[in-house]
Image (cartoon, helix red, strand yellow):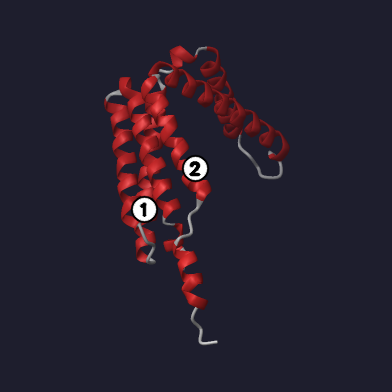
Amino acid sequence: MNGYPMNGYQGYQEEKHRDWPIIIAGALLIVCALACLLMPGITLVTITLFAGAAFLVSGIMDIIEYVRFRRVMALSGWALAYAILDVVVGVMFLVHPLAFSVVLPWLIGAFCLVFGVFEIAAALKGRAVGMPLWGWAVFSGAMGVLCGIAFFVSPATLAVFVALFMVMRGATLLVFGWNAGRMLV
């Protein structure tokens, strides 16, 4: 054969390839963003409960790891103290979600700042190796950084900014999922 795809079909198929799981995840994030906008009070309490559960599980797992590996890995007592602190914070978030939902904007703000900076750095590294759509990832990361700053400046509007962050992440997934065929090299 001459090295060309038969009737151009193979090249056409690659160009039209869509990554449907990523597209569906992006659409679901946008739907969740709308729920955050329509129900901000429930959003804050729900996020607090999820954060509490995450702290609790993390702390329990860290305590188990400390007990199992403290001698082998020469783990410090500080590792155990940190694990216990995670458990205590998790229990407090779960027992009093309304009271601790006040702290949550700063925790989420810190996450968004760090995630946005990492996304920008990854996009710039991707640009250096010829990754398509790197500019969109830089924009998405910058929006994450701005949302993180907004959580610190105006914590009362957490649900709005969580929704904005989710829309940006959802849109990013939609763009990358829809253009997956272009990214296959």
Q: Are marks 2 and 1 in contact (CB under 8 Å)?
A: no
Residue 181 occupies quadrant: bottom left
Give the SS element for disc 1.
helix
Residue 60 occupies quadrant: top right
Q: Earlier in the sequence, mark 2 or mark 1?
A: 2
Answer above or below: position of 147 versus 91.
below
Marker disc for residue 121:
1
Which residue does the image show at 37% across and 61% down from the upper left? 132
Answer above or below: position of 6 versus 106.
below
Residue 120 locus on image (x, y percent)? 34, 50
Instruction: Check disc 2: other Cα within 10 Å, few if <14, some if 14-19, many if 20+.
Output: some
Which residue does the image show at 49% across and 41% down from the upper left? 25
Residue 94 locus on image (x, y percent)? 55, 17
Q: Amino acid at mark 1?
A: Ala
Q: Amino acid at mark 2?
A: Ile
Quadrant for the N terminus, please.
Answer: bottom right
Q: Residue furthest left?
A: 153
Residue highlighted by disc 2? 24
Q: Residue furthest bottom?
A: 2
Which residue does the image show at 27% across and 26% down from the upper left? 153
What separation in Å lies between label 2 and label 1 (alpha carbons)? 26 Å
Answer above or below: position of 159 versus 20.
above
Mark 2 against mark 1, which lies toward the viewer? 2
Residue 177 locus on image (x, y percent)? 45, 51
